Amino acid sequence: MRSSNPVFSRRGFSRDNGYAGFNTAQSPQAGGNPYAQAPTNPYATNPYAQQDTQQGAPQAPARSGVMTIDDVVSRTAITLGTVVAGAVVAWLALPVDAANIGKSYGIAIGAALIAFVLAMVQSFKRTPVPALIIGYAAFEGVFLGVISSAVTTHVSAGAVPQAVLGTMAVFAGVLIAYKTRLIRVNRRFTGFVMAAAIGFMLLMLVNLLFSAIGGGDGLGFRSGGLGILFGIIGILLGACFLALDFKQVEDGITYGAPREESWLAAFGLTMTLVWIYLEALRLISILSGND
């Protein structure tokens, strides 16, 4: 399993194309055969990882040098803080009034392209590069700042706070559902989410193509009733991505992933939260326009 994020190519906490904690046909924790082979540790070569060799069951590492939840929280705070800082700077320095809207949009599109390239470069690297991840967060923040300012100025003054609160609510809801095992991340869940996400992105690309050729909203996936439906689907997909991210973080900690892998956790969580925020902002914009 290589990815659980909208970019589809971010490496997760796995090795040899196996999904951490689900390297066998079915994990007992996922409701499979309790007599099936226990999952193997994808970080067995990590000198800091620990495993019960008799039972094959992973144990939480007790030595330094491995990823902890504190590492994930601190790195995620850095990346999200960089996104927010970039957004604030762009909001203040790149107004979207009549005199500057073309320039501001141009810079925003350029920032989005740079962020995408940095994300792709990191996605195809086997090890995390903090400079790439922070750079992605900074340029993504510039893009979000301009888009958020445009929506606030031209659509709805309250759209941005509502989108932020909605993103936080989705995060909290998925975390609670995951911790209480209302959501069980297994191979079937992962396959369904990735198939749905690929289909969603293909539809959006087709809509963009028709929009570029014929003008307007293409097939109508970004406005009206269809826009609302696809906005809800986009948020639900983001929630599913969060569940996959939580599973990867949990497995990384359980199996003794190296500490630097916490940057990948921060990278993935940031990408997913940006996805949810943008879908929430678009949905609120459509609903505001229908009022």
Image (cartoon, rainbow, N blue to C red):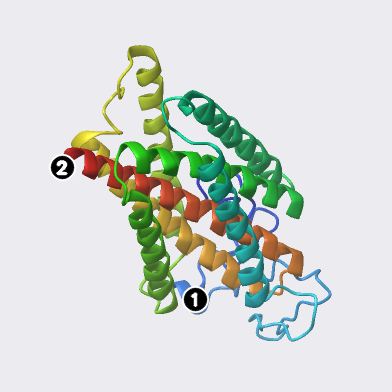
SS state under label 2: loop
Q: Residue furthest right?
A: 47
Q: Residue furthest front?
A: 99
Q: Which mark is residue 291?
A: 2
Q: Which mark is residue 101?
A: none
Percent across and percent down for residue 276 are 42, 52
Kind of residue sitting beneath label 1: Pro
Percent across and percent down for residue 151 are 36, 40
* Of marks 1 and 2, the one in the foreground: 2
Q: Residue furthest top?
A: 213
Q: Which of pointers 1 and 2 lies earlier in the amino acid sequence?
A: 1
Percent across and percent down for residue 213 are 38, 13
Q: Which residue is mark 1?
A: 28
User: Which residue appears at 40% of the width and 58% of the height?
Assistant: 164
Q: CA distance from mark 1 to mark 2?
A: 50 Å
User: Which residue appears at 78% of the width and 84% of the height?
Assistant: 63
Q: Is residue 158 above or below residue 211?
A: below
Do the residues under discs 1 and 2 have CB atoms within 8 angstroms?
no
Q: Is residue 254 above or below residue 142?
A: below
